[in-house]
Image (spheres, rainbow, N blue to C red):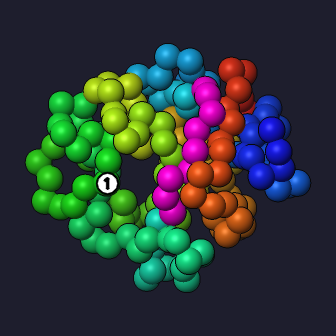
Amino acid sequence: MSTADMVLTPLGLRFRGRLFPCSIGRAGISTAKREGDHATPAGIHRITGLWYRPDRLPRPAPWARAIGPADLWCDDPAHPAYNHHARAPLAASHERLRRADPLYDLVLTTDWNWPRAAPGAGSAIFLHQWRRPRFGTEGCIAFARPHLWWIARHARPGTRLIVPEMAGRR
């Protein structure tokens, strides 16, 4: 491990010499992640993308992609686009990346079950803004907006996200 790695600890996410309070999946950490289980998957993951709402935020980094009205993330295990970015219209189950609330104004995507997604192994494990401190997520890792902004500015494609098998803090 190095300071360039993001490491989940019982006190928060450690990254580049800082510690950020965060929320994890309301079911805790899992070594057997399944779609809809509300758990954050244990393991070593990598950051694969950075998305932002250009109508709400400036571009956080040169490699960030703007979220538009048609941007979706497919969470239907039976669909060929499962656990991938998709565009509307999409009849399969999905999450809208452009939301009315601020949760996905800034999103870092991970390589959990990606790019070759195993049906039912879980989708959309993101780093995003939290609803409030310690409020459990669907499996993502969530932060206060200023902390997420700092993380997004300092992360790069391929940055490692290390989630040990432990009882993480929500």
Looking at this view, name the residue that lies furthest to the top: 32
Residue 26 visible within the image: no
Instruction: Tell me the SS state at disc 1.
Output: strand
Q: Residue at x 88, y 54 (%)?
A: 17
Q: Position of residue 81 (x, y in %)?
A: 23, 44
Q: Residues within 10 Å of mark 1 (few under 14, many from 20)?
A: some
How many marks the image carries: the answer is 1
Judging depth in this view, the residue of 18 and 147 nearest the camera is 18
In the image: residue 72, left or right of residue 31: left
Three-letter code for the amino acid on which mark 1 is drawn: His
Question: Is residue 43 in the magenta section?
Answer: yes
Q: Position of residue 4 (x, y in %)?
A: 77, 52
Judging depth in this view, the residue of 134 and 8 nearest the camera is 8
Looking at this view, name the residue that lies furthest to the right: 17
In the image: residue 124, left or right of residue 108: left
> Which residue was labeled with disc 1?
85
Residue 115 visible within the image: yes
Q: Residue at x 32, y 73 (%)?
A: 68
* Position of 159 relative to 119 (above/below): below
Q: Residue at x 50, y 71 (%)?
A: 64
Judging depth in this view, the residue of 102 and 161 nearest the camera is 161
In the image: residue 121, left or right of residue 134: left
What is the quadrant of residue 1 in the picture?
Answer: top right
What is the quadrant of residue 58 in the picture?
Answer: bottom right
Question: What's drawn in magenta, residue-wise?
Answer: 42-50
The kind of secondary structure the magenta stretch mainly shows is strand
* Position of 164 relative to 133 (above/below): above
